[in-house]
Amino acid sequence: MRALVIAGLLFAAACGGKSGGETMDPCKDPCKDKPAVTHTCADVGANLAADLRAEAENPDDVSDRVPDAVADACQSSGWSQETIDCTATATTPEQGQACEAGMTEEQKSELMLAIEAAAEADIAETQGTDDEGME
């Protein structure tokens, strides 16, 4: 019982609730008014690259350039903070698709072009390396 009381006090303190004699309404979400963690375009890039690698037949085929390319597309096309937060924390394809609802067609297109350009840069680099080895 003592552990439950301590846990409750810690939870209340972490969420900005009051302790020390004042009771909290058990039906009210104590974290509701606490500001949400905001993410960056770099977080989006890292998460999308991780998702692509998880879905790829060969994860090594996903370019190391993808996180930066996605972050650049996110920033240059002006994603909303809501879309950034959503995309940075999506853990399933369905969640990722739901996040796309907050994107314009231009933003979606720029994202796809950025991912394709990252892959093409890897291919060009690999071909350049292969050509040098043949001389």
Image: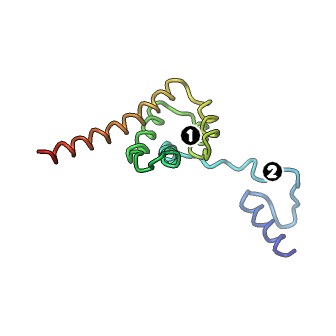
Secondary structure beneath disc 1?
helix
**Residue appearing at x 47%, y 30% in the figure:** 77
Direction from residue 87 to residue 64 in the image, left or right: left
Toward the top, the furthest residue is 105
Query: How many numbered marks, from 0 up?
Result: 2
Q: Are marks 2 and 1 in contact (CB under 8 Å)?
A: no
Toward the bottom, the furthest residue is 2
Q: Nearer the viewer, residue 45 or 123?
A: 123
Direction from residue 120 to residue 78 in the image, left or right: right
Residue to which mark 2 is pinned: 29
Q: Nearer the viewer, residue 18 or 63?
A: 63
Q: Nearer the viewer, residue 45 or 115?
A: 115
Q: Nearer the viewer, residue 86 or 34?
A: 86
Q: Position of residue 17 (x, y in %)?
A: 78, 58
The image quadrant of residue 95 is: top right
The numbered dot on residue 84 is 1
Check the picture and name the quadrant holding the N terminus.
Answer: bottom right
The image quadrant of residue 20 is: bottom right
Check the picture and name the quadrant holding the C terminus.
Answer: top left
**Residue appearing at x 21%, y 45% in the figure:** 130
Q: Position of residue 13 (x, y in %)?
A: 74, 62
**Residue appearing at x 37%, y 34% in the figure:** 117
Q: In the picture shown, does residue 107 fall above or below 81?
A: above
**Residue appearing at x 42%, y 43% in the figure:** 66
Direction from residue 77 to residue 96 in the image, left or right: right
* Discs 2/1, front: 1
Q: Position of residue 92 (x, y in %)?
A: 62, 44
Callout 1 crowding tier (Cα within 10 Å): few <14, some 14–19, many ≥20: many
Q: Coloring scheme of the render?
A: rainbow
Q: Position of residue 55 (x, y in %)?
A: 52, 45
